[in-house]
Image (spheres, helix red, strand yellow):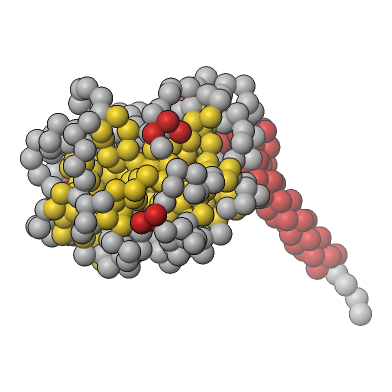
C-alpha cells in the first residue's frame, strides 16, 4: 500500500493536535488541583502558559479568573471572566456560570449595576432551575419565606420538634432569655422555662421523651447579641440542662462552671455533643445518654469524652444522619498553618470541618477565603446549610455534603443566621433581623423563586 506525503502530513498534524490537547487537559487538571489546595500563585503561573499557547481556551480563562479572585486580584479576575463569556458563545450553560461568577465579583466590589446586568443576561438566557436559584440567592431569598415571630423582643435559636409541627426557640421577651414553643404557623405560643436570673438558649428536642435539652448561663445586662462562634479565651459560665415540657422540671446534665455551650443531639438521641472552653481554647466533647435516667441524675453520673484537643477553637457541632460523624467550625490562632488563614488576612478564618465521633479522620470540608459558621445537615444527608460572611453581609448558604455546589439562599435586609432543617428536609427555620429585630423565619424548599418572579425583581433593581 502506498501512503502519500499528503496523508502522512495530515496524520502527523492530527497526532500533534491530540498530544497538544492531552497536554492542555493535564495542565488544566493540575491547575484545578492547585486552586483546590490553595496554591493560587502556582496555578496562575501554570495557566499563564496554557493561555499563551491557546488564548481561546475558555476553561483556562475561568480557572485563571478563579485563582486571581482567591488572591483578591479582582482587577485581573474580571477580564478573564469576560474573555470566558465571549469564548463560551456556543455553550450557553457554561456562559451562564461564567456570568454568575463575574456578577458575584461585581456585587462584592459594590458595583451593583454591572452585577445586576450580568444577572439579567443570565435569567433571560436560561431556564435551568439550578442556575435560577443561584441568581435568586444573590438578590433575594431563593425560596418562599414567612415570618413566624413578631414584636420587639429578640427571638432566636430555633429548632424543630420531632414531628415538625412545633419550633422551640429562645426569646428575651421577659428581660432574660427563656425557652418557648410555637407552632410552625406562628400560633400557640408556650413558655417552657422560667429562670429570671439565667439565660436559656439552644433548645434541642430529646426525641419524643418530652424533654428539651438546652444551655444555661447567668443573666447578663444589656441587649441580646447572637455570637456566631465563641472562642476559648473568654470565660463562659454555662451548663447544659434538660427541661420536661409538661412538668416544668429541669435536670442538670453539666453544671454552669464547666463553660459548655451549643448542645446537639445525635439522631438516635443517645449522645450529646457540645463545645467547652478548656485552657483558653474551645474543644468538642460528647456525653453518652444511654442508660441515663434523667429523673434521677446525679452531679457525677455522666462523664464527658473529648472529641478534639488542639490549639484551634472548635465549636458549633452538628451530627450527620448516621450519628457516626459530626461537622463543626474550627478557627486556629495566628500562625497555626495555611489551613487556618486567608491571603492578606491576619485573623484566623472560621471554616467547616468533619470528624468521626471518636475523634478520628478530621477533614476540611470546604476550603474558601470566607468565614463560615453554624453548619447543619439535611435529614437525607445530602445537603448542608451554613452561615457565611461575604460581600459585607452575613447570609445562609447551601452546599452538597461533599463541599461542592455552593449557593446562597437568603438575601434579605440585614443578616440571616442560625439555620435548622425540618425533619422532612422540606423547610428551613432561621433567624434574621430584616424586620429591625431578631425574629424567626421559615423557608419552604418546595416553593422556589421562579424565573418570571426573578425577571420582575431584577427589572426593579
Q: In which quarter of the image is residue 426?
A: bottom left
On the rendered structure, is 81 left or right of 439?
right
- From what the image shows, is residue 353 above or below residue 295? above
Question: Percent x, y for residue 39?
Answer: 64, 34
Residue under the point 25% across and 33% down: 198
On the rendered structure, is 447 left or right of 365?
left
Pick the quarter of the image with the C terminus: top left
Residue under the point 29% across and 29% down: 218
Question: Percent x, y for residue 456?
Answer: 15, 52
Residue under the point 29% across and 41% down: 201
On the rendered structure, is 23 left or right of 35?
right
- Is residue 18 among what the camera can see? yes
- From what the image shows, is residue 66 above or below residue 230? below
Question: Percent x, y for residue 112?
Answer: 27, 34
Question: Percent x, y for residue 20?
Answer: 73, 52
Residue under the point 80% across and 68% down: 7
Amino acid at each position: 500500500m502506498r501512503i502519500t506525503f499528503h496523508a502522512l502530513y495530515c496524520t502527523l498534524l492530527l497526532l500533534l493536535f491530540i498530544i497538544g490537547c492531552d497536554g492542555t487537559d493535564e495542565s488544566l487538571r493540575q491547575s484545578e488541583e492547585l486552586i483546590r489546595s490553595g496554591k493560587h500563585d502556582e496555578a496562575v503561573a501554570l495557566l499563564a502558559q496554557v493561555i499563551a499557547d491557546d488564548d481561546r481556551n475558555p476553561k483556562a480563562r475561568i480557572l485563571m479568573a478563579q485563582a486571581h479572585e482567591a488572591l483578591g486580584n479582582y482587577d485581573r479576575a474580571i477580564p478573564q471572566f469576560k474573555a470566558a463569556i465571549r469564548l463560551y458563545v456556543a455553550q450557553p450553560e457554561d456562559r451562564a456560570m461564567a456570568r454568575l461568577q463575574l456578577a458575584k465579583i461585581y456585587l462584592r466590589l459594590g458595583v451593583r449595576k454591572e452585577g445586576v446586568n450580568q444577572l439579567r443576561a443570565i435569567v433571560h438566557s436560561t431556564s435551568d432551575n439550578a442556575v435560577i436559584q443561584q441568581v435568586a440567592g444573590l438578590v433575594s431569598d431563593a425560596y418562599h419565606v414567612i415570618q413566624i415571630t413578631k414584636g420587639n423582643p429578640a427571638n432566636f435559636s430555633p429548632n424543630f420538634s420531632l414531628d415538625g409541627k412545633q419550633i422551640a426557640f429562645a426569646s428575651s421577651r421577659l428581660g432574660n432569655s427563656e425557652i418557648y414553643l410555637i407552632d410552625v404557623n406562628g400560633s400557640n405560643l408556650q413558655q417552657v422555662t422560667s429562670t429570671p436570673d439565667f439565660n436559656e438558649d439552644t433548645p434541642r428536642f430529646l426525641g419524643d421523651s418530652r424533654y428539651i435539652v438546652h444551655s444555661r448561663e447567668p443573666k447578663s445586662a444589656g441587649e441580646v447579641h447572637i455570637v456566631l462562634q465563641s472562642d476559648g479565651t473568654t470565660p463562659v459560665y454555662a451548663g447544659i440542662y434538660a427541661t420536661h415540657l409538661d412538668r416544668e422540671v429541669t435536670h442538670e446534665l453539666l453544671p454552669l462552671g464547666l463553660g459548655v455551650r451549643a448542645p446537639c443531639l445525635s439522631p438516635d438521641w443517645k449522645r450529646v455533643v457540645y463545645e467547652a472552653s478548656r485552657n483558653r481554647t474551645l474543644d468538642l466533647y460528647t456525653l453518652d445518654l444511654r442508660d441515663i435516667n434523667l429523673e434521677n441524675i446525679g452531679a457525677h453520673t455522666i462523664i464527658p469524652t473529648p472529641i478534639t484537643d488542639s490549639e484551634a477553637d472548635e465549636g458549633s457541632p452538628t451530627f450527620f444522619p448516621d450519628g457516626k460523624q459530626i461537622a463543626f467550625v474550627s478557627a486556629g490562632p495566628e500562625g497555626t498553618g495555611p489551613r487556618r488563614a486567608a491571603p492578606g488576612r491576619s485573623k484566623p478564618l472560621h471554616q467547616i470541618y468533619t470528624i468521626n465521633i471518636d475523634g478520628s479522620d478530621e477533614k476540611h470540608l470546604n476550603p474558601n477565603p470566607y468565614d463560615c459558621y453554624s453548619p447543619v445537615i439535611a435529614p437525607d444527608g445530602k445537603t448542608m446549610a451554613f452561615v457565611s460572611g461575604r460581600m459585607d453581609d452575613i447570609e445562609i448558604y447551601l452546599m452538597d455534603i461533599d463541599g461542592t455546589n455552593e449557593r446562597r439562599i437568603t438575601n434579605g435586609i440585614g443578616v440571616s443566621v442560625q439555620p435548622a432543617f425540618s425533619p422532612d428536609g422540606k423547610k428551613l427555620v432561621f433567624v434574621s433581623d430584616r424586620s429591625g429585630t431578631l425574629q424567626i423565619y421559615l423557608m419552604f424548599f418546595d416553593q422556589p423563586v421562579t424565573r418570571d418572579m426573578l425577571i420582575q425583581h431584577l427589572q426593579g433593581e
